[in-house]
Image (cartoon, rainbow, N blue to C red):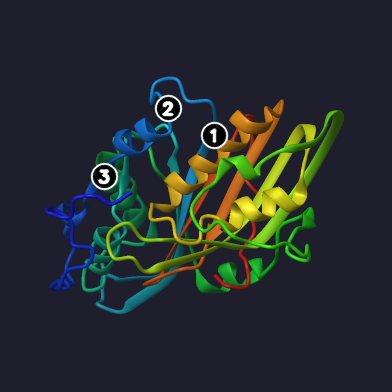
Amino acid sequence: MVISTDDLPLGKQTDYVAEYMPSLLRPIQRTESRKLLGLDGKALPFMGMDIWTAYEMSWLDEKGKPQVGVCEFRFPCQSPAIIESKSFKLYLNSFNQTPFHGPREVIAALETDLSAAADAPVIVQLLPLAQALQRGLGHYTGEPLDHLDVEVQDYRPNPNLLICDQPTSYVNESLNSDLLKSNCPVTGQPDWASVYIEYQGAAINREGLLKYIISFRQHQDFHESCVERMFTDIMAQCGPERLTVYARYTRRGGLDINPYRSTGIGEPQDVRLVRQ
């Protein structure tokens, strides 16, 4: 999917503003990409969120001394809009030379501005570096797929690769792969990710699932839309009773984006991967 860039800073030479400016944020409506997937924004087949992590968050205290932290943002998947990533980076950069009366005031400003842009409540967590360090690095639970010896011919999403080995068998399994790659729909730059798939239902052919994940390699779309396409394709082709698709993308410009879509109610794994 290629989108209009007329009002977006992505892919353009941009002046970096160092003083607080909420107007830098540019929302992108989810409607267009969801229409392509046959999704009605008012009756989504999944729940979930988009988790953004900012590793380059800084502001000034009342004495002008710089403060730093790691910030996590949780956007509900029901929000009408996502935030264009470069505008998000520019907006966060605008905090750099702005004094705030402590982290709570920073969080309040972030939640107010981002909720207004996304048109839905956004939850913000701001961690001191020492606390962020305690989280360490990890990986998804479940079984990896990447050791499978597959021959790959498709580098555009091909849902026909998704088949059930034994339609009458019933499994509950968690699988993961580090071979997900898609491309930015504006700049064409590569977006690298690891994906976690948990489902309950007829056993999905693992070789076909891995080839399907790899088939996104030349696909141009936003992170959130790629995960929603995976979710809807697996549902349509294999019909599991329960399904979760969770991708964590490698950071770019100090931000990573981690979409989580699930048929169930719950929180995604709290994990930071090695490439993040």
**Above or below: residue 30 compared with residue 88:** above
Mark 3 — residue?
Answer: 28
* Element class at badge 2: loop
Q: Residue 248: x, y in percent?
A: 55, 58
Count how many numbered circles sit on residues in the image: 3
Circle 2: residue type: Leu
Q: Nearer the viewer, residue 179 or 73?
A: 179
How busy is the neighbourhood of tag 3: few (under 14 within 10 Å), some, or many (20 plus)?
some
Res 16 label: none
* Element class at badge 1: helix
Q: Residue 239: x, y in percent?
A: 67, 27
Q: Nearer the viewer, residue 219 or 19?
A: 219
Q: Nearer the viewer, residue 190 or 261?
A: 190
Q: Whole-Å distance between the Cαs marked 2 and 1?
A: 9 Å
Which quarter of the rendering shows the C terminus? bottom right
Mark 1 — residue?
Answer: 232
Residue 68 shows in this picture: yes
Q: From the image, state whether disc 2 or disc 3 is nearer to you.
A: 2
Is residue 123 rendered to the left or right of residue 234? left
Circle 3: residue type: Ile
Q: Are marks 2 and 1 in contact (CB under 8 Å)?
A: yes
**Above or below: residue 106 compared with residue 199:** below
| First-in-chain label (2 vs 3) | 3
| First-in-chain label (2 vs 1) | 2
Mark 2 — residue?
Answer: 39
* Element class at badge 3: strand
Quadrant of res 22: bottom left
| First-in-chain label (3 vs 1) | 3
Q: Whole-Å distance between the Cαs marked 3 and 1?
A: 21 Å
Which residue sits at x=54%, y=31%?
47
